[in-house]
Image (cartoon, grey):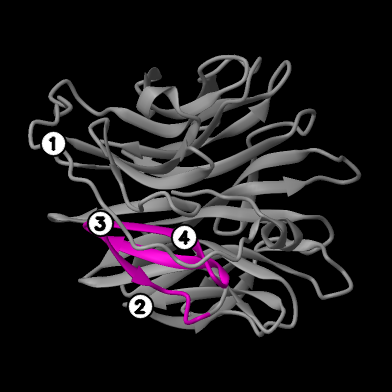
Amino acid sequence: MKVLHLSKRMASALISVIMLANLGCSESSPDDEKIDDSAGPKIYVAGTKPENQNTSVAELWVNNAPLNISSNNNPGIANSVFVSGNDAYVAGYELSGNNNIATVWKNGTPTQLTDGTTNSTSASIFVDGNDVYVAGDEVGNIGFNARLWKNGIATDLSDGKQSRARSVFISNGDVYAAGWQLHNIEFTAVVWKNGVSTPLTDSSKFASATSVYVSNGNVYVGGSEYNNESDKTLVAKIWKNGTPINITDGTKNALIEDVLVSGDDVYAVGWEMLGNASEEVATLWKNGVPTRLTDGSKNARANSIFIHNDDIYVAGSERGTQNDKAMLWKNGIATSLTDGMNLGRAFSVFIK
């Protein structure tokens, strides 16, 4: 469900020191066109697609057919999609003026979550009954501030620390989010439950959480952590109820982007470096056992997973002729959603 890739140094470079803006929110039209799913299951993929050589826009694919949901072809990204009933909800952001604005689209109609005074993004969306939850961030006086929006109303998750929320999940009325906070001088993987943060790591080395999933009362969080402060090899990890499980051995960089539980099986997707290769390999793990979705000849990432009727769908990207192309894998079989000439990526998949 989600997706922003920032190293510690990249994040520090992007942080501005402007005061936190008052939040604004526009309303969706009551006459939003609903999506007809009477013909059977549909495959929804959220991402970004090139509108021209210089601009990529927020995009929603339905059964591989693209729909540009950006306002006036503004540059943007659709990070997460969730379908409830006949309504398709998408979270992401659009560039307006000099700033990105966290945005939710319902059936293609946008609602801005902030007023655009500072940069903001929405990374993940979850719909529970009539309530729409969005995890993301907004830049304020301390830098990135983790945010959770419920029906457009923002809650600050930062605890006064630089932070980002990357994923949201609702279970039995409890609201879970995952991301990172800056503790002292180090990025720390964090899970929030009903707004209360719990660090998953000890802040001695870089760590970040990217996904949260709750099943049978167990809380699974996917992410990564350095081997140690001197060995900055990323280890792919899943924390189950706060206990870390190494998914990779730390000999090469790896990262989990999304985690999902089906029955007794724990799935994760992300990327891993192989051997001496310099390219990232899109990877699916089932109970810690990897399946390579790409061969390592071109850079590729797996960003999101969804299981429907025993079929496994994965959204991601792979290097094309000149740029990344948006990809969808079904049971390991790849479909290109863009041509790879200009930038395209898929960040989230949902089957209805």
Q: Which label belongs to residue 29? A: 1
Magenta residue span: 133-160
Mark 3 or mark 1: whose residue is earlier in sequence = 1
Which residue occupies the foreground of this view, 178 or 32? 32
Task: Mark 2: give few (<14), some (14-19) or many (20+) Cα within 10 Å.
Answer: some
Q: Which label belongs to residue 152? A: 3
Task: Mark 3: give few (<14), some (14-19) or many (20+) Cα within 10 Å.
Answer: many
Q: Is residue 346 above or below residue 101?
A: above
Measuring 75% from the left and 76% from the top, which residue is drawn there?
205
Question: Residue 191 at x, y = what percent?
Answer: 47, 74
Hey, what amino acid is under mark 1? Ser
Q: Nearer the viewer, mark 4 or mark 2?
A: 4
Q: Are marks 2 and 3 in contact (CB under 8 Å)?
A: no
**Residue 263, visible in the rendered structure:** yes
Residue assigned mark 4: 137
Mark 3 or mark 4: whose residue is earlier in sequence = 4
Q: Are marks 3 and 1 in contact (CB under 8 Å)?
A: no
* Dot 2: element: loop
Q: Which label belongs to residue 195? A: 2
